Image (cartoon, rainbow, N blue to C red):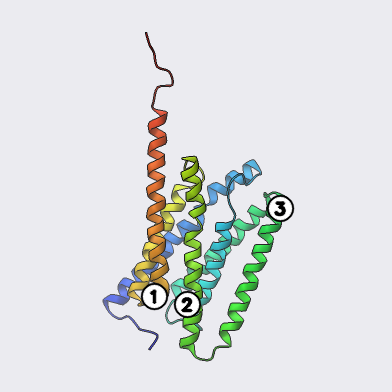
Amino acid sequence: MFFSVPDGTFKICRDAAGIAGNIFAFGLFVSPIPTFRRIIRNQSTENFSGLPYIYALLNCLICTWYGTPLISYDNVLVMTVNSIGAVFQITYIIIFISYSLCGWQIRMIGLLLAVFGFLAIIVAGSLQIADQGIRWIFVGLLSCVSLVSMFASPLFIINLVIQTKSVEFMPFYLSLSTFLMSTSFFLYGIFNFDAFIYVPNGIGTVLGILQLTLYFYYKTKSVEESLEPLMVSHA
């Protein structure tokens, strides 16, 4: 049997974790706003990457489909939060395209069309599967892969932080919201007995801890360096 209905304490804990995940996810969705204010103000995307928003959109769309009753049992909180997230990501991508160089504009538009095309193939293909259990596994695996890809997308930023020894391009609230949301849905997946939710979000929790650790390390280091005297007197 593919679906297990949590009852009693498990259901309460699951719903609590899901609601917390929705709240933290909203914080994640709005966290890039300062970045896009800067992009609009400077009329340039600078060294910011648009790929995390493409990955996030793909993840939100696939997870929205996974959360529908046609695919999985009692995952309405997954469906609603990801549908809202998709609206935010599309908005960010449009702004990013507007202020990107020509080469990046073409690349981002191509990736955006590819995302919608891929979603259409997933929806059409999964509806051809008559057995709901197999359909659940098929879409669940895809949602799991998309979640891992989304959580892995900040690895580019992590590499940039290590190279530049600066957290300028890794906003703190984005990293914090990612960690809190991942942890909440990790617990939600456990209480809902859904490996397609708790496995990728468990990975996201680990990567979130890594981002926060790097942030505080380089933030503290930069503060310490700024406190060092600029000149040493030999008098």
21 left or right of 128?
left
Mark 2: amino acid: Gly
Q: Are marks 3 and 1 in contact (CB under 8 Å)?
A: no
Mark 1: amino acid: Ala
Residue placed most toward the observer, 65 or 23: 65
Residue 69 visible in this rendered orientation of the protein: no
Residue placed most toward the observer, 101 or 9: 101
Residue at 59%, 45% in the rendered image: 47
Mark 3: amino acid: Gly
Q: Which residue is mark 1?
A: 195
151 left or right of 104?
left
Quadrant for the N terminus in the image = bottom left
Residue 66 point in image, percent of width and height: 50, 77
Q: Is residue 27 above or below residue 4?
A: above
Q: Residues within 10 Å of mark 2 (few under 14, many from 20)?
A: many
Q: Which residue is mark 3?
A: 103
Q: Are marks 1 and 2 in contact (CB under 8 Å)?
A: yes
- Choose the circle earlier in sequence order: 1 or 2: 2
Quadrant for the C terminus in the image = top left
Residue 129 point in image, percent of width and height: 55, 88
Residue 53 point in image, percent of width and height: 56, 58
- Element at label 1: helix
- Element at label 2: helix
Q: Is residue 226 above or below residue 6?
A: above
Q: Residues within 10 Å of mark 3 (few under 14, many from 20)?
A: few
Q: Are marks 2 and 3 in contact (CB under 8 Å)?
A: no
